[in-house]
Image (tube, rainbow, N blue to C red):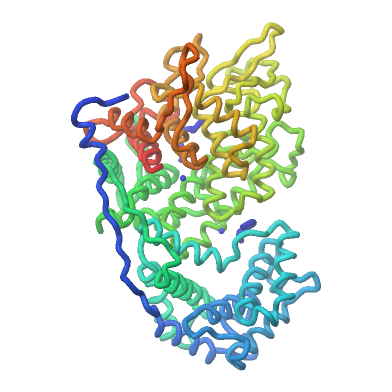
Amino acid sequence: MLTPRILPAPVRRRSILLRAATCALLLAPLAATQTAPTKFGTIFRGEVDGAVAALRAATTAATPGFGDGSVRCNAMALTALGHCHRFYAQGDGPVVRTAIQTLFAGRRADGAFADRTDRSDSDVAATTGWCAEALGVMDPELYRDDVRQAHAWLAHHGQQGPTPWQARLAAVRDAFARGAGTPVDFGRPAATALAETTDRGSAADRAAQVDQLVTVVACQVVARELDAGKVPAPAAAEWSEAQQHGFDFLLAQQKDGVFFVATQGGSFPDTGVSGLALAALQTKPAALRSEAEQKVIDAGLQALLAQQNEDGSFAQRNANYTTCAVILALCAAGRPEFAPALQKAQHYILGIQNVESRGYARQDRDYGSIGYGGDQRGDLSNLHFAIQALRESGVSADDEALAKALVFLQRTQNLRTVNDFSGRVRDDEGEWLDVVSGDDGGAAYYPGNSAAGYVELPDGKRIPRSYGSMTYSLLKCYILCGLKSDDPRVQHAIGWVESNWTLDENPGADPSLDPKTRYQGLFYYYMALAQALDIAGLDHLEVPEADGAPARKVDWRAELRTHLAALQQPDGSWLNDKNGRWWENQKTLCTIYALLALGR
């Protein structure tokens, strides 16, 4: 479970019933629809033309083509030129000729493209992805075989997925779809920076200028798509009074975007809590945020960036939780300038997975897992945060890291057809237990261990009990790792959820334990529940009734919304007043969990 201080190096491979009349007021959504201009026309024309002219003028024998003269930089520039409002192509002669020659100077016999500085497959994949995009837009017929061979290399090396250019486009489209701004809004910072670097002449950072050019041209492309009706208008943004009340409470707990943890001796700033809090604040649609609210979020994001360590992590302890929390906050902002920090953080998380590179073999209990950081054993709580962070920062569902994570995930599930773990383990009190898998489809904390207790079999063996927060975490992970809804592992997890549906407690605890056990991690449970069911695409649950009556169809969103509104404190916060374990005696953390749940 979550512990107190909880909370793209290159991208390796391409979130109590209340019946009184006040309930209606608390739950009434405030809607605001962002309406885009009827037509954008050609945006950022001057900035693009000026940058292209400046880049051409800066070409030297030492830096041929564009930017710093590297293969990747030239490929990025050609991609931008081919997609911009001028639609440069192979036939444009000297404007593009030298850059294309530079690409082929980096062509390898196996079909990939690489710079001398590319040290890993992921480096080569990034360069190859840009080159394939550049050649395809310069002349798709002439370079058809070259593009095909580049994509074949990417697929063979497990690097398939969106190209870097496609990721840029997706970021702009997503920002618009979320109501976070139009292509003009999204591209304005890069366009301003592009104009400034153009004005600097020979003193400009040409590689940075090319990167800015790519972002600005991506905005041009999406603006054209919008003008052509190819991108749907953003949905109306909904935000309830209860959410705003919780939002206001969180704002009161920070200073310059940094959040604090209370202790007996006072309070101290915490990067992990700050990351989660900023992710929670960003569940409020950007179109509905006030200037003051956005200022706090912006300040907090910059404060997070300043905390990154050289290895990509964001903390001195409990590094996985903290780094994942920061990734979620940065990804929620959807800003291209955060990409380098996200890549380093993603690289760190991949580097602490318990796999072969760290000396683990598949038969090891912890194989595929991620723990608190360093050499600590893995668990499902750490892993589900990590998998969400990896996916949101760009790792594809078919990545080998997620395939290895599935080995561990199956060992947490009480499903004998997939759980191959059994043996002697020590429980939280140090007692030796002989454990085996159960078969109810739910999940425990890690193989052989459950915070909800154990089921003792007649032969003395123990089954770690499945419980709510971990079963929802498992379901979430299965979907993020690419399992389909009809996969038996997914179906059994959903079956446990439906058979144990409740919002009154974190279900699954051994009845013989202290009654408070049922309420441990309650708000974490609400967050995991909402994330899992939303990610799994489940709008309703079929909850079995007693005595064989027909199953009850549950609108989980409506029930959770009502339940959380009833639990909200007068000051806008939420608090687990039945069991403060895992820091749920802190209003700030419970409020974060509640807002993240309501955001789903």
Residue drawn at 44 percent across, 37 percent down: 539
Q: Residue lying farthest front?
A: 550
Residue 270, percent from left and from top = 41, 43
As drawn, 498 above or below 260: above
As drawn, 104 above or below 583: below
Frontmost residue, 261 versus 33: 33
The quarter of the picture where the C terminus appears is top left
Residue drawn at 42 percent across, 16 percent down: 516
Q: Can residue 295 be seen here?
A: no
As drawn, 206 above or below 398: below
Q: Quadrant of residue 107?
A: bottom right
Residue drawn at 26 percent across, 26 percent down: 18
Is residue 19 shown left or right of residue 304?
Answer: left
Is residue 22 shown left or right of residue 397?
Answer: left
Q: Can residue 409 be seen here?
A: yes
As drawn, 521 above or below 307: above
Residue 57, percent from left and from top = 53, 92
Residue 562, percent from left and from top = 31, 31
